[in-house]
Amino acid sequence: MALAELAATGSGRVRIERATVHFRAAGGKRVEALAETDLTLEPGSFTALIGPSGCGKSTLLNAVAGFVPTSSGAIRVDERLVRGPDPEVGVVFQQYALFPWFTAIGNVEFALKRFRMNATQRRKEAYVALDEVGLRGRERVYPGQLSGGMKQRVALARTLASRPKVLLMDEPFGALDAQTRVSMHELLLRVWDAHRTTVLFITHDVDEALVLSDRVHVMSAAPGKIVETIEVKSARPRSVDNVDQGYLANRNHIMGLLRNSRSLASDVTGTA
């Protein structure tokens, strides 16, 4: 089945139920990285997660991806308990993690080797995915010859080629310049609108969260937990150059929550 044939199927629901994550630091000290968290991502939704640095955003994403085990509680994708990485859950990180010795199409094809498809099928799916992210004609180019934005397009194509039901994105555009970032926002929203994959998007940027998502969950300082959820009702498409009163109200409210969270963290740690 080609990527273009995908549509919303009612699948891709993520349930996070009283999940916590603890680590052991040097000396055996127990560190709470994620406080008890409950969250449901409905199929086809676009959800942003924002909070202070070190609050546990990436820890939560990595737990949903199956990279980090929960210490208590549970995470389920379509009612299946997450026990490790799942091919139906795709992840895009800020670092592109492309193999420099493979071309763009080679990177995408390599990611498809875990699936039961022959070389011809892999090549076909890789071409479709690269075409979808606007890289037609760049299939034979190596990562070292691509700009940062194009590298991230290859990384996105590599993830899309596996047709995930859930797409986890950990600050994927954080290293890009402002103009490239806007074009990546537009591309991501086109892809999401076409497939309605369930998206969980981690960001530090309030405007990015409000432009992209249906819902913004704001986390407290570490150990992080969700302190408030903001429904984004501004009509799509959105742009920071053309905002309504609802957008501005949400932006100011989220900024206030983040400032308060940072202030509380400073009081606890004694840092500025």
Image (cartoon, rainbow, N blue to C red):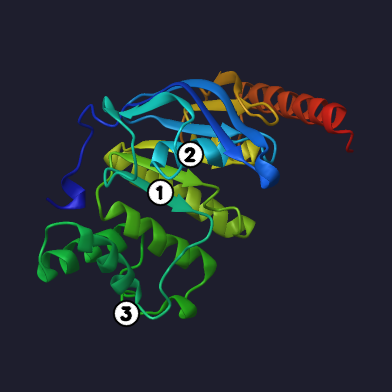
Q: Nearer the viewer, residue 144 or 131?
A: 144
Which residue occupies 17% across, 56% down? 115
Residue 128: give x, y in percent of width and height: 23, 61
Q: Residues within 10 Å of mark 2 (few under 14, many from 20)?
A: many
Give the mark nearer the N terminus: 2 vs 1: 2
Judge whether 242 appears above or below 256 on screen: below
Residue behind mark 1? 91
Q: Is residue 125 left or right of residue 270?
A: left
Q: Is residue 157 above or below residue 107?
A: above
| Residue at image point 23% right, 33% down | 8
* Disc 1, SS: strand
Give the number of the disc on residue 141: none
Residue at the spot 73% in from the left edge and 29% down from the top edge: 258
SS type, badge 2: helix
Mark 3 lies on residue: 140
Q: Residue at x 30, y 57 (%)?
A: 132
Checking the image for residue 61, the label placed there is 2
* Residue type at the position of mark 2: Leu
